[in-house]
Image (cartoon, rainbow, N blue to C red):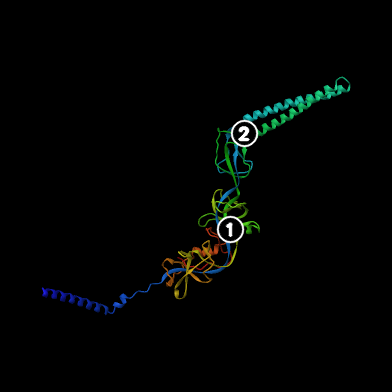
């Protein structure tokens, strides 16, 4: 029994010695240190841009909606039956163009009746006036009394009043006949046909058509009450220039002027309503259409500007990766950021001429090495630096945009 136990202990000891020997042999191999050593991280490919110092307009950018300069829902002023609807849906009309015609037969008969009554009473008035002249002459000769002369004069005056009433009745019948033709009250665009021949309409009841004046066009939009003081200061110097654009890339822009500001702040939204006027000569904007509205409320001098894609958001707020010496990056916190047209205006945390990373941030950590990718074509942000003033693109924030003829675009490599 003791012999068996000693044999097992000896076998285990021999195995341990063999494993230790193998470990010593492996550790002494020439390539062992190389395989176990940590490999250096390769540089991260990124694109970069240089922060610029420039004057940037302070822009307020909101969403607005087109609104007809004038709009009217046409209704009949008399009862009748629709005889014809001669306009084409969506037609551009001028002032006085015929849109709907009602059956005029009934009103033509009423006019003829009123004119006949007026002619009858006019003849009776002429007879009464002749009687007055005759009785005045007889009274002068003593053949009739003063009372008789007064009587015939009263009859003549009553007939004169009757003739005036007949004239008014004929004019009313003439107006009612004219009301059977509904015409455009101003130039604009007429909408869909809401009635058709044969339909019966009542006075001021049935809508026959809707006409909108779209040249010029209103654009209504809401301004946050926090910007109200700036807006009023800008309006104090005259009409406020407004840039109107349609949503989407390469959208056209329209110049307008803001003149109207409402007299109260909406308690439910904390905004105040404003309106801008756009000439809309080519009728490219329509009532009810959503548009982007940009207002210049001042200029920020010597602002630090970078492409907006360089700004990242973290748990502690906004930051950028700034390129330092030896192609390493550091994380820099930012404050007071406003954006517009692909550009970010930095209030604190960045200086002019510093280089920031615009693409590839997800693989970066503070102190990481980078490799700048070769430029393929200008980025959208670089193009935005050139066109910020000429064609601002609406964003939710209030920010400045570059003016024409100022500093060149932010140099940035292609992604």
Expressed as whole percent of the image width and height from the top left, the position of residue 261 reads 62, 53
Q: Nearer the viewer, residue 94 or 235?
A: 235
For label 1, the residue is: 227
Expressed as whole percent of the image width and height from the top left, the position of residue 99 reads 60, 39
Expressed as whole percent of the image width and height from the top left, the position of residue 39 reads 35, 74
Please indicate whether residue 240 sits to the left or right of residue 310 in the image.
Answer: right
Please indicate whether residue 117 sits to the left or right of residue 255 in the image.
Answer: right
Q: Quadrant of the N terminus?
A: bottom left
Q: Is residue 26 above or below residue 237?
A: below
Which residue shows up at 75% across the image and 29% down it? 161
Which residue shows up at 69% across the image and 32% down it? 171
For label 2, the residue is: 78
Q: Nearer the viewer, residue 374 or 2?
A: 2
Q: Is residue 97 above or below residue 131?
A: below
Q: Is residue 128 visible?
A: yes
Instruction: Name the element at disc 1.
Output: helix
Q: Is residue 211 above or below residue 318?
A: above
Which residue shows up at 76% across the image and 28% down it? 160
């Amino acid at each position: 029994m003791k012999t068996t136990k000693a044999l097992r202990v000896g076998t285990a000891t021999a195995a341990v010695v063999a494993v230790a020997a193998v470990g010593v042999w492996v550790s002494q191999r020439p390539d062992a240190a190389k395989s176990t050593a940590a490999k250096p991280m390769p540089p991260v490919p990124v694109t970069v841009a240089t922060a610029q110092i420039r004057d940037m307009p302070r822009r307020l950018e909101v969403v607005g909606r087109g609104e007809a300069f004038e709009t009217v829902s046409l209704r009949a002023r008399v009862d009748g039956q629709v005889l014809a609807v001669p306009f084409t849906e969506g037609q551009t009309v001028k002032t006085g163009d015929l849109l709907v015609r009602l059956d005029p037969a009934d009103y033509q008969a009423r006019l003829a009746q009123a004119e006949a009554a007026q002619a009858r009473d006019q003849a009776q008035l002429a007879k009464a006036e002749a009687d007055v002249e005759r009785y005045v002459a007889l009274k002068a000769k003593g053949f009739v009394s003063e009372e008789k002369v007064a009587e015939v004069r009263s009859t003549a005056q009553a007939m004169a009043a009757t003739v005036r009433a007949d004239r008014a009745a004929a004019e009313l019948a003439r107006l009612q006949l004219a009301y059977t033709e509904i015409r455009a009250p101003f130039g604009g665009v007429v909408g869909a046909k809401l009635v058709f021949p044969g339909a019966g309409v009542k006075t001021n009841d049935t809508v026959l058509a809707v006409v909108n004046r779209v040249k010029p066009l209103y654009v209504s939009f809401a301004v946050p009450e926090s910007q109200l003081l700036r807006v009023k200061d800008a309006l104090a110097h005259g009409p406020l220039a407004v840039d109107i654009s349609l949503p989407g890339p390469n959208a056209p822009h329209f110049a307008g002027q803001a003149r109207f500001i409402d007299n109260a702040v909406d308690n439910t939204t904390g905004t105040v309503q404003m309106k801008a006027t756009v000439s809309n000569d080519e009728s490219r904007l329509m009532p009810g259409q959503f548009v982007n509205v940009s207002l210049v409320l001042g200029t920020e001098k010597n602002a630090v500007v970078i492409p907006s894609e360089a700004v990242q958001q973290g748990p502690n707020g906004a930051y950028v990766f700034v390129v330092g010496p030896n192609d390493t990056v550091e994380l820099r916190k930012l404050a007071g950021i406003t954006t517009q047209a692909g550009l970010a205006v930095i209030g604190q945390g960045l200086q002019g001429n510093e280089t920031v990373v615009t693409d590839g941030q997800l693989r970066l950590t503070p102190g990481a090495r980078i490799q700048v990718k070769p430029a393929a074509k200008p980025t959208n942000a670089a193009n935005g630096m050139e066109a910020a003033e000429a064609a601002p693109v609406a964003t939710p924030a209030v920010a400045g945009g570059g003016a024409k003829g100022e500093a060149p675009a932010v140099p940035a490599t292609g992604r």
